[in-house]
Structure formats: structure tokens, C-alpha cells
Image (cartoon, coloured by chain):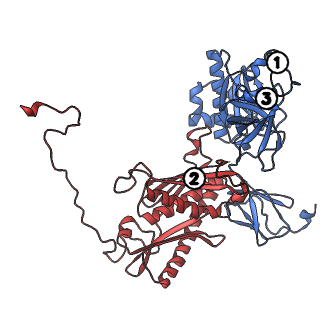
Chain colours: A blue, B red
Amino acid sequence: MEIDEAPQKVDIAARIVTPGTAITNDSAFMRGHGTFSEHDTIYSSVAGVVERINKLVSVRPLKQRYSGEIGDIIVGRITEVASKRWRVDVNSRQDGVLLLSSINLPGGIQRRKSESDELQMRTFFAEGDLVFAEVQSYFADGALSLHTRSIQYGKLRNGTLVTAFPQLVPRSRSHFHTLSCGVDVVLGVNGYIWVSKHVPASKVEANAELIYSDKNEPISDDEREAIARVANCIQLLNRLYVKITDTSIIFAYEASLVHSVKELLTHDVAVELAQNVMARLEQQA
Amino acid sequence: MSLNITDRRRINGPQRSVEPVYTTTSPVDAFAAGGRMDGRALDQVRPIFIKTGPLDAQSLSAAAPSGSAYYEQGKIRVSCAVYGPRQGRKSSNNARMGTFDCDFKYAPFSCSWKRSHVKTSDEKEIALMLEQAVAPAIRLDAYPKASVDAFVTVIESDGKAATIAAAINCISAALADAGIELYDSVAACSMSLHSEQWVSDCSQIEENASSCSLLVARMPSADEVTYLLQHGKTTPEQTQQAIQTCANDCTRVYAVICRYLQATLE
């Protein structure tokens, strides 16, 4: 590593900066995210913490919009039905695009797309619907192209949406979790999290019509309470800036059982639960 | 007899009417005692209070702003919510650059007289000024096709130029809170001319007594002026002197904003 041999006059990392602060005028460094350079000096463009990886200097802000990467699993909301495509709000700086050609049409995957499909696009996804999708590629202007070509992706129903900070949802092997309390959680890395009643995948596979169904299944009061409890647990983790993973949700859920659902978001209970979760996560690590 | 027939189609006044009680305030001379009414030095800015994120935690829905700030400067109270960068409107889409839009509103109770709840032309004008003052600081080239929107509400106002300056400072704090990429934070400061002397950050009473007001918005680290506004007549030397003093005040205000932002991150 060359950089370690060079004498480090001042450690530039871990400094807290505000927009416009000069970070370094050493031309050995490269500018990364959250910085810009002018007259050979690197300045910060956001308020945050300076991070240095070898020669790359970047500033990590506390809050960030989601910026997509190919392969990300996300939850989005349809904002517009356009010709051969849907526009999807993905909590990013631009709306994502879901092409008609990148969804599974009912009645066989190998079926050819016809004009009648174009005319009845709203029967698949209408404005306001939530979709569970994967980032397929970028467009030239940086907009995300999504796809739902798998049985696990598609329209979301039977539950509630929770919005969290995108940076709290790490990318992991699996983003679809079934908790032991009979609740399904879809962790979109864009910060949109879907909490819903558990529906076995075999049931959807058996009936292809269900993929684009708008109807909720009957949800009992106990299931509703479990969904609300999990949703509140995620909200309190988000509020206290704890990483949101299946483990942290399960820990929060288990710790929350002594409280009633509506108590969970009161400040004292939320802090107590979050500390409990963080302690258990540390213990596990 | 005819007095007993009431007109039901109209709202009738009470039977007996009394004259309203007026509070008689004689017009005060802001600089009567030789100094300022609140005992400040002539180039002293009122104490500043900032808080970022007051509107963020209100709801966890998509309607929550991406950043917000609350700003106080003496009696002035301003709040600002920033949304975005988000998908811009179709028509105004510029392929390479993002857009910055600003909305400015006086609350109906914010001034000593009642403000209209409908947006008036001077509010639109101020919104445009804020846009022009803050937009140069935003790295709009980093956000193609996206738009950043700021919504400013004046809760209490005290001096028009000072309120606009406060709004600019408030937007700066909210933009930083939203994590939007900036070249620098914009800090603004105003002053008024009173009998050949420049007075910083004037209240409404002081402003009424002055002949000219000047507003400077500046990016102190980059050392660039983003907006300059003067109302009234001065000599070029006077204006030059005022710009210099205002620029110094801006740097001080900027230091307050930066110190606050750093403190929130720790």
C-alpha cells in the first residue's frame, strides 16, 4: 500500500465537516462521494463525516437519498402508467422505470407480449400500487430500470408500508423474511419496508391470478396486531438509528412483547427497546 | 313595529354597538437615545437559534420532507422544509441540470397587520429572490432531471430585509440537513442606513426609520456573493462600505450555522 508509506501529516478521516469546508489540498487524494474539487483542493459538499479509503476521500452524510445499484431488491410505489412502462417512486433522486417487458405476464412466462397487454396495463399495476422488484440496469440518465421477473417479486398486499432511512437497510443475501409471528417482511434497500400477513408461496404459485390481485385476504385481529407490532418495531429502530435487519427486527419484536403495541413508539419505551436490541446485537457479534 | 322584523338573509349586528378600544402607541424613534432600542452595537446581529429536522419526524410516510430547519433571529421565526432531490416535473425537465424551486409564505399572524392567506405578489417576489440567492450554492449538475424544493414559512417577522436574510439562512440549514450536495452554505445578512450610518440586522421599527436597506447573501468559504439587494438611495462609497460590513456579518452568521451543523453530527 503506497498511501501508508507516505507520511500522513494530519489524519483527515473521522473529521466532521460542513458544506464548503476544505478537506485537503494534497493532490495525492482522489475525490469521492460528497466532495468536489476546485483549484486542486478537495472540499466537502455535504455535512457529515470524512472517510478515507486509501487515496479515496469521501464524506458520508447522516441522511442520504437512496442511490441504486444493479441487483438491489427494492420496494417502490407506482406513480404513473406510461406507454409500455410504469414510473415507480423508489425514494431516489429520480423515479425508476418498470418496463412492460420486464414483468411476468399472467398465463405462462413464455407468452408473447401483445397489444392487448399494453391496453390493460392498469390491471397489472395501477397508480399507487406497491411493487417488490429488483434493479435490472440503469438508463443513460441514471434512472433505474426494474424487473419483477420472478415469482417472489410483484404486487404487495395484505400489509402496511414503513419508511426508514435507506442507509439503515443493508444489502444482504435475503430481503424477504418470514418471522415466527406469522408476519412477512420485505426489506427494500431503498428504505421502503413492507410488513404483511404471511401467505405461503405455494398458494401464489398455484394461482397465477393472485400475482396481480388487488384484494386483501381476510386478516384476523391477531394478525393485524402482529403486523402493527412489527411495523412499530421497525419504526422505533429507524427513529433511534439502529440497523434494520431480520435479526434486529426479531430482537425488537421479542423485547416488545411486554408492552402494548401503541406504547412502543413512546419515547421511553422506544429508547429502552432500542438499547436492548443493540446490546443483543453486540453480544451476538 | 318594523324594528321587530329581522332580516334573516343577512348577518345582523348586535343591538348595541360600542366603539373599539384603541391602544394608543405614539410612534417611537428607534434611535432616540443615541443607541439602539435593544442596546445592541450598530454592527451587531441579533442572537440566532437554529434547529434542524423539526418537521422530519412528524410522519414516516413518503410525505415527510427530506430535510427541515427552524431558525430564530431575535423576534424573527422562520421554518423551512426541503424536499428532494426528487423526480422533476415533466415540462421543466432539463436533461443535465436539476432545478431548485422555492416557495415563500408569511403566516397570516406573522406581521403586525394581518397577512392574507392567499399568496401575494410580494411573497412570490421574495420566493424568486430566495431561489436566486440559494441556487448557486447547490450542485444542481449532480442531480440531472431531479428537482429540489424548499418551502419557507415565516412564523414571525421583524424587519423585511432581516426576514429575507433569515429565510436564506434557514434554507441553507435545511439543505444541509437534507444531505443535498452544496458548494457552500449561503449565509445572508441585512443592514439599513440611518442618518449616514449603517445599522446591521434592523428590526421593523428601526427599518421604518431608515432611508435605505441592503441585503447581502454570500458563500463565505468560496468567497462569492450570490445575491445583493438594495432599496433606497446611497452614494457608491456608502454601498461599498455596507457590502463590506454585511460580508463580515455573513461570515459570523455562517460560523454559527456551521458550528450548529457540526454539533448535530457529533
Mark 2, other Cα within 10 Å: few <14 / some 14–19 / many ≥20: many
Q: Is residue A151 left or right of residue A123?
A: right
Q: CA distance from mark 2 to mark 3?
A: 42 Å
Is mark 2 in CB contact (under 8 Å) with mark 3?
no
Foreground: disc 2 or disc 3: 3
Same chain letter for marks 2 and 1 = no
Q: Secondary structure at mark 1?
A: helix
Picture quarter containing residue A196?
top right
Same chain letter for marks 2 and 3 = no
Q: Amino acid at mark 1?
A: Glu
Dot label at residue B9:
none
**Image quarter (top left, top right, bottom left or bottom right) of the N terminus of chain A:** bottom right
Q: Amino acid at mark 2?
A: Ala
Q: Residue at x 77, y 56 (%)?
A: A33
**Image quarter (top left, top right, bottom left or bottom right) of the C terminus of chain A:** top right
Q: CA distance from mark 1 to mark 3?
A: 26 Å
- Of residue B108 and residue A282, the one placed in the foreground of this image is B108
Q: Which residue is mark 2?
A: B150
**What is the x, y in percent for residue A147?**
81, 34
Q: Residue furthest right?
A: A1
On screen, A36 above or below B247? Answer: above
Give the letter of the chain under mark 3: A
Q: Which residue is mark 1?
A: A205
Q: Amino acid at mark 3?
A: Glu
Give the letter of the chain under mark 1: A
Foreground: disc 1 or disc 3: 3
Q: Secondary structure at mark 2?
A: strand
